[in-house]
Image: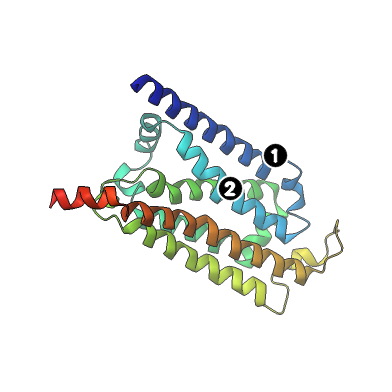
Amino acid sequence: MNEKVNVTSVSRRLAAFISGVLALWVAVGSPLAALDHELLTFHMLQHLLLMTVAAPLLLIGTPEIILRHRLSRWLPVRIVTHPVFGWLAGTFAVVGWHIPAFFALGMRSNAWHEIEQAWFLAAGLLFWLPVVRPGSYVAGRPWSIPLYLFLATLPCDALSAFLAFCDRVVYPHYLSVRRLVDISPLADQELAGALMWVWVTFAYLGPAVVFIIRMLSPQRLDVREKAV
């Protein structure tokens, strides 16, 4: 029985890791990687794939012992798995790289563009780490993860609302580039903001709802009552 469970667990991890690698390729190695210079919508899609799809799937598929060994070489595990650290990493990536000056830097330089992509993937890994691999801080505070995910939507919602409702093009780069589809730069920006708004809402609040349902399940409540 235990062997069957182990095989199933390994298969799920392998499937998650392969899916994460595939999402990473779609974001940075497929034709999508070139389209992000032509449309802000594709640029936003690339960031979302890196942070909310590739990153959590790679974490789910990485064995615990390998993950902790690698993390301990760079930063203390307790710091890295702390929700505050993950929230700051994700927020700084989303807000920082969408400041017009930094955004223009990534558009002008291939090297900086690759750094930007790597930054979003690394920020995604740090952001999802407390969710996928909760540490001691989360274990004693079961409501911290749903709150963590809810708070993470706030800076994303602010940025997406700004892009969707701003009456001017924020990034001049898209005023002069060739377009594959007949869409104005302002409409493209509005679509990118709407995409981010809807995507992040489902990507962050979906897992939060799952955590809440698990916490309120009869089995979990019975365990807590017996512990008391």
Q: Secondary structure at mark 1?
A: loop
Residue positioned 26% across, 47% down in the render: 136
Q: Which residue is mark 2?
A: 50
Specify the farthest residue to the front. 218
Q: Which residue is mark 1?
A: 29
Residue 98 can be seen, yes or no: no
Query: In front here: 198 or 90?
Result: 198
Q: Amino acid at mark 2?
A: Leu
Q: Which circle's residue, 1 or 2, is located before the other in the chain? A: 1
109 to the left or right of 198: right
In the rendered view, would you say 135 is above or below 95?
Answer: above
Q: Residues within 10 Å of mark 1 (few under 14, many from 20)?
A: few
In the rendered view, would you say 148 is above or below 125?
Answer: below
Specify the farthest residue to the bottom. 167
Q: Quadrant of residue 30?
A: top right
Q: Quadrant of residue 66?
A: top left
Q: Amino acid at mark 1?
A: Gly
